[in-house]
Amino acid sequence: MKISQEEKLRNEKVILETASQMMAEKSFSEVSLRDISIQAGLSQATAYKYFKTKENMIFRFFELIQDECREKLTEIPDFGNYHLEEQIQILLETQLEILEKNRSFVSQILHDALNLDFFQSAQGFAPVREKYESMIHDLLQAAIEAGEISKPPVYGFVLRSFWDLYVFVLIYWIKDHSSHYTNTTQLIEKILGVSKALLQSQVLSKTSDLFHFVIKEHVFSLLDKMMKKKSTPVEKKSPFEKEPS
């Protein structure tokens, strides 16, 4: 019997929520598809129709995060009137706010299953990257039309770099144990300050290859070392919450 798209999405979410809870308590490697299907109250054959591997679950998990983020951005009053730098900061912080409830799960899969090369090259991440870059594209186009920035001469590079920076922020956030993730907030502000300066400059086309090399080879190699260190328990709290006065 054919099921509706709504029911399909509901089953996907049940499987993903079950997987995230189980992997947060154990680890990515210790939980099997069979374990997840049993806990979710579905047959293994049914679960297999949605996800052939645990990696497929991760791809879909991050893809749904992009859908939820776009929806939340549309609900922000006057979002289109903000400056580009503010919009991208809100986008990044919205991503992390959505991920907060599954922070232990994200920490586990980053530590046990994935590495930076996987984020950058895995074909399964293509839909995730495309949806994220689509949001960035919309913001850049609006800023170009408003005269806030000129169209970058290496537009594809710019989109690719924003994806790299998203991954950078995500992994930094997982390792951030500062109060209310203030270190991550400061990092985002610094990154966007540099990004805005580059977008507004006339040297981007000349420095793009060098800049991309620095981001990919130096920043990400540092993060790769961080990920290999033994992870510490994650404290449950709301990101970007202001300190009480």
Image (spheres, rainbow, N blue to C red):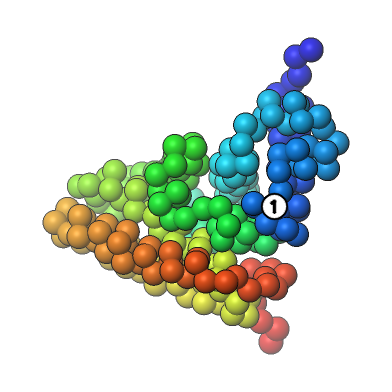
Q: Amino acid at mark 1?
A: Glu
- Give SS at disc 1: loop
Is 55 situated left or right of 19 in this image?
left
Q: Is residue 174 above or below residue 62?
A: below
- Choose between 208 and 140: the one closer to the eye: 208
The percent position of residue 156, horizontal first and vertical second, equals: 29, 43
Q: Position of residue 95 (x, y in %)?
A: 57, 55
Which residue does the image show at 51% across and 53% down from the upper left? Answer: 114
Q: Horizontally, is 34 left or right of 156 in the view?
A: right
Residue 155: quadrant of the picture: top left
In this view, the residue farthest toward the right is 41
Q: Is residue 144 left or right of residue 28?
A: left
Quarter of the image with the C terminus is bottom right
Q: Residues within 10 Å of mark 1 (few under 14, many from 20)?
A: few
Q: Residue visible at 85% across and 36% down? A: 41
Residue 136 visible in rendering: no
Residue 27: name its quadrant.
Answer: bottom right
Front-most of residues 205 and 20: 20
Comparing 102 with 93, the one in front is 102
Q: Pointer 1: what residue?
A: 30
The residue furthest front is 30
Quadrant where the N terminus is found in the figure: top right
* Residue located 68% across and 25% down the image: 49
